[in-house]
Amino acid sequence: MEPGCLEIKNWNGVLGSTLSNLMYIDYTDDDKLDNCVREILKRVNANNLKNDVKLENGYYKGPVNDKKEPHGFGTMQYNDGSSYEGYWKNGLREGKHGILKFPTGVTYEGDFKDDEYHGTGLYTEKNGDSYEGDFVHGALDGHGRHTLVSKKVAYDGQYKQGNPHGQGVMTALDGTEYKG
């Protein structure tokens, strides 16, 4: 667990008396807070919500709703070999800082809404090509940096519906820049 972010006296009683058991949380760093919440939920799930559910598309471990759908923080091992660790809402990936890994070596770490990349995230290909920035309904949309290791070039700028759009800077490996 992150040093200094959280201490809990008794993990087994955490559901019934979470607030009285929490000694402190450092709210000054969103990523640190998210890591703390992730750690709390892992421990709560491990001690109190032992739901292992076989679903049509894979195997899920974590809390579920009344319909036995993933709901809360959990992990899913999909039948195709991919995996997801993060937050769920009524069976859909939803929330901040989820981690989706594909058997092809592709990873996405970031925000989800209604089971799609939505918010900020980092999408990385097996060869090292990556995009870090904004996503809307699964598409690059907003500001981001697309690094093409294979072509030795990076584009930092605006995107709309998956395509460069508006102002941006293309930078080659040798430092040459094109602005437009």
Image: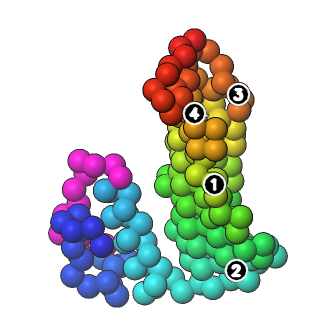
Q: Where residue 163 is drawn, which disc sits there?
A: 3
Residue 111 drawn above or below residue 161: below
- Assign a secondary structure to mark 2: strand
Dot 4 alpha-carbon crowd within 10 angstroms: few under 14, some 14 to 19, many 20 or more: some
**Along the polypeptide, which appears first: circle 2 or circle 3?**
2
Q: Residue at x 69, y 53 (%)?
A: 115
- 79 or 14, which lies in front? 79
Q: Residue furthest right?
A: 56
Q: Position of residue 85 (x, y in %)?
A: 56, 67
Q: Residue at x 32, y 56 (%)?
A: 33
Q: Where residue 127 is drawn, which disc sits there?
A: 1
Q: Which residues are magenta?
A: 18-31
Instruction: Tell me if 89 is positioned left or right of 46 in this view.
Output: right
Mark 4 and mark 2 in contact (Cβ < 8 Å)? no
How far apart, in angstroms, are the residues tagged by discs 1 and 4? 14 Å
Give the residue number, with chain letter if any, for mark 4. 153
